[in-house]
Image (spheres, rainbow, N blue to C red):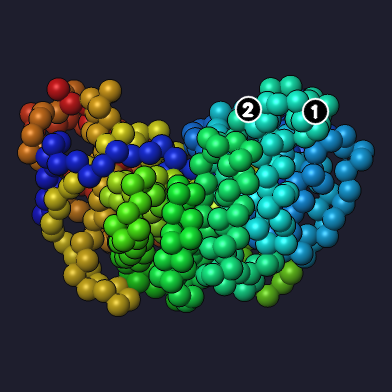
């Protein structure tokens, strides 16, 4: 028997909805043939695929990062604005392809308005300069009578786009990046970019690219950055991708420890630097690229450059464990962006005739729709398992949130057992259940089950209403499943 206890007064922090963010890059079929396909019978008058927009709306992503990724480190934003017939095709060095620039700043803003999401732009801190970054902020947000503001208006956008979130560079710590920067080079560049971007619009929030290459000295990198530009860092960005290369389910399921460890390390680093540098303002963590990605890195050029990963059920469990970790660390993780959103390592997969929802779509939708505004501390004990370098890990991976307005508790549980249904008592230490509890379960025939055009519902969601006693509930978590129990409270 497993036991979960929740005290509604033991709060870990406020959850920022931006933990359900996305990321869309000029890469493979993310835009062209995915989000944007003018001439397709499925596209609207402006060329956006309506089926894709509808699927994205279901995910309720409150923020989407754009335009890269590695792509941005060689991108000239001016190439992507203005009349289509005047836009030039450029070589995209990051992904070894041609970029027609038919999609750019204004198309992305239109897209954001259509899916009701906030744009988050990343500026080129690879082969780009601070002038270009400053000008992009001015073009988007400027209100004065300047040449760039006139240009935006000439392009059909009278009102400013009001882009609030701006990243300075992408994965600058990786030698694979166009314009890799040493810790000292980035700290200097960041400060100067930030300064002039804020001279253009002082209200913007800035995200520093800190760690994606975990074998680099990230402590030194964080330290130098926060010594050099303490007032200009609103978020420290970290990236990771995980996968089951060894085809070892138990080992794969221990990945929760890796999330907790990395986030915990950055929580400590930021706290230490704020104390040392006497930084008054908060600095948050943005995990602004994360996902499962290990298959489509293969030998062929197409695999390498399209990244069309097909996900299975075990990957969906790992996506849910990401959200559990972000909720458990809600106090400092204020943004997280699944990489990416359509076709390229993504929950939505299209062909010219339609789309199917990948397995990882389902936990994303359930969490983003049911997550409350407060993260709760949860006590749980029971069955354990061993995998990889870990032993005695709890088989259930758990998080919980409270929605103060709706008076509702959401309990999220990933059952990491491949074989066992786990009967569990769930007790409230304070407060009472009221009315039936809604149980949403993501599952499929086995851990390798995938969705496809031919078989789109191998992995899907079932829901059921269950009865709770005053402050007790007994529930059996299915093997290899993700469950959200949404409980109305008195
Ligand atoms: O998301 C795919 C790539 O992964 C991004 O371009 C890059 O930032 C990361 O390495």
In depth, the one of 417 and 345 nearer the eye is 345
Query: x, y percentage for residue 88?
Result: 89, 48
- The residue pinned by badge 2 equals 114
The residue depicted at 28 percent of the width and 23 percent of the height is: 405
The circle on residue 203 is: none
- Residue 16 visible in the picture: yes
The residue depicted at 72 percent of the width and 35 percent of the height is: 139
Q: Residues within 10 Å of mark 1 (few under 14, many from 20)?
A: some
- Marks 1 and 2 sit apart, C-alpha to C-alpha, by 24 Å
Kindly indicate the quadrant of the structure image that contains residue 301. bottom right
Q: Residues within 10 Å of mark 2 (few under 14, many from 20)?
A: some
Kindly indicate the quadrant of the structure image that contains residue 303. bottom right
The residue depicted at 52 percent of the width and 46 percent of the height is: 206
Query: x, y percentage for residue 427?
Result: 10, 40
Taking 213 as reference, is 114 above or below it?
above
What is the quadrant of the C terminus in the image?
Answer: top left
Ligand 1 under 8 Å from disc 2 Cβ: no
In what element is the residue under mark 2?
helix
In what element is the residue under mark 1?
helix
Taking 171 as reference, is 166 above or below it?
above
Taking 149 as reference, is 37 above or below it?
below
What is the quadrant of the N terminus in the image?
Answer: bottom left
475 on left or right of 18: left
- The residue pinned by badge 1 equals 150
């Amino acid at each position: 028997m497993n036991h979960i206890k929740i005290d509604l007064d033991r709060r870990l922090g406020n959850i920022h909805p931006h933990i359900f963010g996305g990321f869309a890059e000029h890469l493979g079929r993310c835009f062209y043939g995915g989000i944007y396909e003018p001439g397709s019978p499925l596209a609207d008058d402006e060329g956006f695929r309506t089926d894709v927009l509808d699927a994205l709306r279901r995910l309720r992503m409150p923020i989407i990062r754009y335009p890269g990724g590695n792509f941005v480190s060689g991108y000239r934003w001016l190439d992507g604005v203005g009349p289509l017939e005047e836009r030039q095709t450029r070589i995209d060095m990051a992904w070894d392809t041609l970029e027609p620039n038919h999609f750019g700043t204004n198309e992305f803003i239109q897209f954001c308005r259509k899916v009701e999401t906030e744009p988050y732009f990343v500026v080129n801190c690879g082969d780009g300069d601070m002038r270009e970054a400053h000008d992009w902020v001015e073009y988007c947000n400027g209100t004065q009578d300047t040449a760039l503001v006139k240009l935006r208006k000439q392009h059909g956008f009278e009102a400013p786009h009001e882009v609030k979130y701006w990243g300075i560079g992408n994965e600058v710590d990786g030698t694979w990046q166009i314009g890799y920067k040493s810790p000292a080079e980035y700290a200097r560049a960041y400060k100067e970019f930030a300064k002039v971007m804020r001279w253009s619009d002082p209200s913007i929030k800035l995200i520093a690219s800190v760690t994606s290459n975990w074998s680099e000295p990230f402590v030194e990198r964080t330290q130098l950055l926060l010594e050099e530009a303490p007032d200009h860092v609103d978020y420290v960005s970290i990236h990771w991708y995980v996968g089951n290369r060894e085809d070892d389910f138990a080992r794969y399921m221990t990945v929760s420890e890796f999330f907790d460890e990395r986030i915990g390390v950055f929580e400590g680093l930021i706290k230490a630097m704020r104390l040392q540098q006497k930084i008054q303002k908060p600095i948050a963590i943005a995990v602004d690229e994360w996902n499962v990605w290990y298959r489509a890195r293969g030998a062929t050029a197409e695999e390498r450059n399209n990244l069309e990963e097909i996900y299975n059920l075990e990957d969906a469990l790992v996506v849910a464990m990401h959200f559990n970790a972000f909720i458990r660390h809600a106090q400092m993780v204020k943004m997280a962006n699944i990489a990416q959103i359509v076709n390229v390592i993504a929950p939505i997969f299209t062909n010219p005739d339609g789309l199917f929802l990948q397995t990882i779509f389902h936990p994303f939708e359930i969490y983003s729709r049911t997550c409350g505004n407060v993260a709760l501390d949860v006590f749980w004990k029971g069955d354990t398992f061993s995998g990889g370098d870990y032993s005695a890990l709890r088989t259930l991976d758990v998080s919980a949130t409270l929605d103060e307005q709706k008076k509702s508790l959401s309990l999220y549980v990933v059952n990491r057992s491949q074989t066992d249904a786990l009967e569990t008592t769930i007790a409230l230490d304070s407060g009472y259940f009221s009315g039936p509890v809604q149980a949403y379960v993501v599952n499929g025939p086995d851990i390798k089950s995938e969705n496809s055009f031919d078989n789109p519902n191998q992995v899907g969601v079932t829901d059921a209403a269950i009865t709770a006693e005053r402050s007790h509930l007994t529930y059996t978590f299915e093997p290899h499943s993700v469950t959200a129990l949404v409980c109305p409270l008195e």
